[in-house]
Image (cartoon, rainbow, N blue to C red):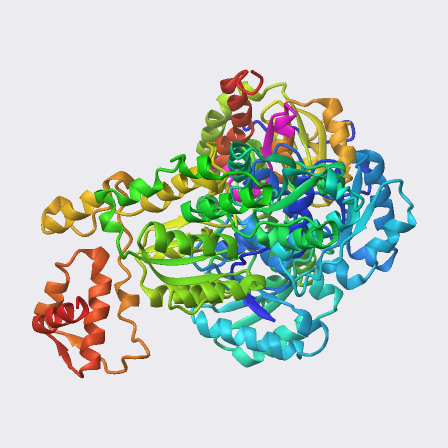
Amino acid sequence: MNLPFRPSPNGNDRGCTDQQTLKQRGQHEVFCGLTSIVWLHRKIENAFFLVVGSRTCAHLIQSAAGVMIFAEPRFGTAIIDERDLAGLADIDDELDSVVGRLLERRPDIELLFLVGSCPSEVIKLDLKRAAQRLSKLHMPKVRVLNYSGSGIETTFTQGEDACLSALAAEGQTETQNASDHLVVVGALADIVEDQFRRLFSEMGIDNVTFLPAKKANAPLIIGSKTKYLLAQPFLGDTARVLEDRGAKRITAPFPLGAEGTTAWLKAAAQSFGVSEEKFESATAAGHRRALIAMEAHRDALQGKRIFFFPDSQLEVPLARFVSEELGMRLVEVGTPYLHRAHLSEDLARLPAGTLLSEGQDVERQLDRCRAEDPDLVVCGLGLANPLEAEGMTTKWSIELVFTPIQGYDQAGDLARLFSRPLDRRTRLGGLLCN
Amino acid sequence: MQLTVWTYEGPPHVGAMRIATAMKGLHYVLHAPQGDTYADLLFTMIERRNARPPVTYTTFQARDLGGDTAELFKTSCFDAYERFMPEAMIVGASCTAELIQDDPGGLAKALALPIPVIPLELPSYQKKENWGAAETFYRIVRELARGDGDRATRNPKSCNILGPTALGFRHRDDVVEIKRLLGALGITVNVVAPLDARPSDIARLGDAAFNVVLYPEIAEPAARYLAKTLGQPMTTFVPIGVHATRDFIREVAELAGVNPDDVLNDRQSRLPWYSASVDSTYLTGKRVFIFGDATHALAAARIAKQELGFDVVGLGTFSREFARPMREAAAALGLEALITDDYLDVEKAIIDAQPELILGTQMERHIAKRLGLPCAVISAPVHVQDFPARHSPQMGFEGANVIFDTWVHPLMMGLEEHLLAMFRNDHEFHDGAAPSHLGHAPRAPEPEAVQTAPSEKAPIITGWAADAEKELNKIPFFVRGKARRNTERYAAERGVPLITIETLYDAKAHFSR
């Protein structure tokens, strides 16, 4: 089977590689990094995420998670109160006692993250020192790490970046006789992780680790023999930590859709010297299934105009997917932050001249969106219903983060996330307007 | 520092948002870090509002902290004024902005906008959502309500309805119900606030003769202020339940000088008859545990006891501001009130009280699910399910009907409960069978484990003989926990080391005296 690779971008076809972004400063309608706890705590078994923050932080995670899906979740908030701020209580002692009570109650916990928040950052609470102190106290049973998910430093998925950086910094060092090995970086749904592991194995790449691992204490080995492949586009800090430790990044687009997944796997295959034949025999079936699964959605979405509000930093790879693989037209691709190096392959595959915006002034962006009147708007939950009420069709972006979308066997699901809102609007017809 | 898994209330600025979002022509400028905009989705998703809350967030980031966050606030405030052209603005800080002490009130004042700008001081590290809503409403009323109304020209048969907000538990439907009730009494509603009120409506609150306080958590400070400065009396009965609705009707009739008899005699509520009908006999003495905001929990306790004939075995609230009336109400029921915002304490109290029905919030619904107990939701914090498409008030006579259905539905129906007892060894009527009207999902395992947890009063560990245990299992599951507990208490008090069939029936006789 002929792999439908697009020719790699050359001087004449560099897509959006050098495209300037529109930067406006105003209200950001985005989540803070604490929100990523919602999926991280499900992903990493035996880990607990303790936010050191305010009632707002607790309320945010509770609201973002949907009220209480899990009986007793592996996250909680140590709420700073007036006594802590006024210095009436020693904040270190208070934290130690909260952690002590927590670990007593949850003997299954092996890894505890102290997660910094806006208030803890502003009062300059040293959670790194606290983590070291508590680690000493509770090792070897419980390892204590820290990172910040504060809104003043992180946007939504950057919380995962901060968490994975902390894990990467802690990873073990390679031994002298280590051989080349692959680390896939970025939280993926278990089912996706297993699919990729099988695909790598069929190509003969068996030494594969995933970061984060399903088990809190699974070993992570990092060194100069480490080649890492990003599975998520928002991991700038984690990549820096890995590179500081000698790891090398495999340049690839992100594994969305048939083409994205193939190109992502291909980049790894080439880096590990996998033969063309072996690569094809490992991926041909998956690639074919993905095309079949996307077909009906492609018919529904072809030529439709789509507008992305910034949310998860997945916007550029998603825009690449919908334009290249579903034939949609990009009106605006907003992203909280554009990491040009990590997104180089996806940017090169975007149609030249696409409007890219970075950061946000939500009011002016809404003005642009209304003026453009796109067929589909990808936006957060705060904007979706109001825009629907104005007559626009929306896809809430958070679902693109919570749903398994990567890999061949999710390509159809991913396409459906975009086609379903349009399908629904067609089915409902004139219901909303008399 | 307090460890919190789930929280009953958001921070106070979310309370302020509930006021701003309820009103029209009012805009809230909130000094807050990036991420605090999550609160918008409470309104657009849980309540399915079709517009964004009228809130502008400064969304400062770390790099702004080194620069001028105060300037950022001023720009946001001015831009919001120009874009939305509100009649009035409220300005304040969220928890993080409170720490950087930029003084939003002072900064906004310096802009000299041609509209009233009301500064809010909502201490995030001490107070919570409902307090924030009450304080915000009070500040708005204080700033905007005209004090010059001529008391003599007021229509004595006119009132304001105070308290309904955005994201309130059935506030939307309660307002409809109460307006209908007041209409039937011949009383005019001058202003409903904050829900759907404009700042200009707040200005004319003084035109009414008295104020109806629907939700004391939200409206009491404002109503007290109006009573003091404008001489408007306020209602004290919250019309949830048949008795409370009747009390409320008498109270407003007295305030307005109208005759309540026709409205009182109009048998609009089916609750009294349904409760008296023989099918409801099985409700007698059902053990109920009640937890919620103070208004709804207090009302639920009265309904449970006086209108459905339940036994209230636990009563509590997360509204610390209302600890006193709650303690009094609990004491009248021979209970100690549970005043806490710690979900784990509530769970423990429920396990200890061994109720047969829980009336609580969405949190208690989860506790109930885990313990395999029936549950009805009576109070915020709200969930998308608490905004049903149909009219579903809690207040007035129709509210009482809704409450009857909502509370009784999760329980076994009367006749069904008898059949279950009669045919308890039949394979279709086995203990695990769920009520037929609730579908066929497997019943959660019974909370036996928690019921056998040693109680403080019974340090002697008494065991069950195999035949006694078997006999116990013949008792229908919904009373088995009670039977087990009573028998163990009986055995412990008498130092019986092994519970036999004899002990079981001795205990039964003892407790049925």
Specify whether residue B35 is in view. no
Side of B507 relative to A243 (left or right): left
On screen, B53 above or below B119? above
Q: What's the residue at 24%, 83% (across, down)? A: B460
Residue at position x 84%, y 39% in the image = B79
Say whether residue A253 is magenta.
no
Q: Nearer the viewer, residue B493 or A147?
A: B493
How far across and down, in percent of the image, does residue B187 sit?
A: 58, 35
The C terminus of chain A appears in which quarter of the rendering?
top right
Residue closest to the eye, A324 or B152: B152
In this rendering, the answer to whether B458 lies above or below A191 is below
The boundaries of the magenta stretch are A387-409
Q: Left of B459 or right of it: where is B497?
A: left
Q: Is residue B466 visible?
A: yes
x and y percent of residue B227 in the render?
A: 68, 52
* Residue A408 forms part of the magenta stretch: yes
Classify B420 as above or below B155: below
Residue B431 position within the rendered picture, expressed as x and y whole percent measured from the top left: 18, 52
Q: Position of residue A185 (x, y in %)?
A: 58, 52
The residue nearer to you, when weighing B456 against B300, is: B300
Q: Quadrant of residue A243?
A: bottom right
Q: Against B473, is B137 above or below?
A: above
Which corner quadrant of the image does residue A166 belong to?
bottom right
The residue located at (70%, 30%) in the rendering is A350
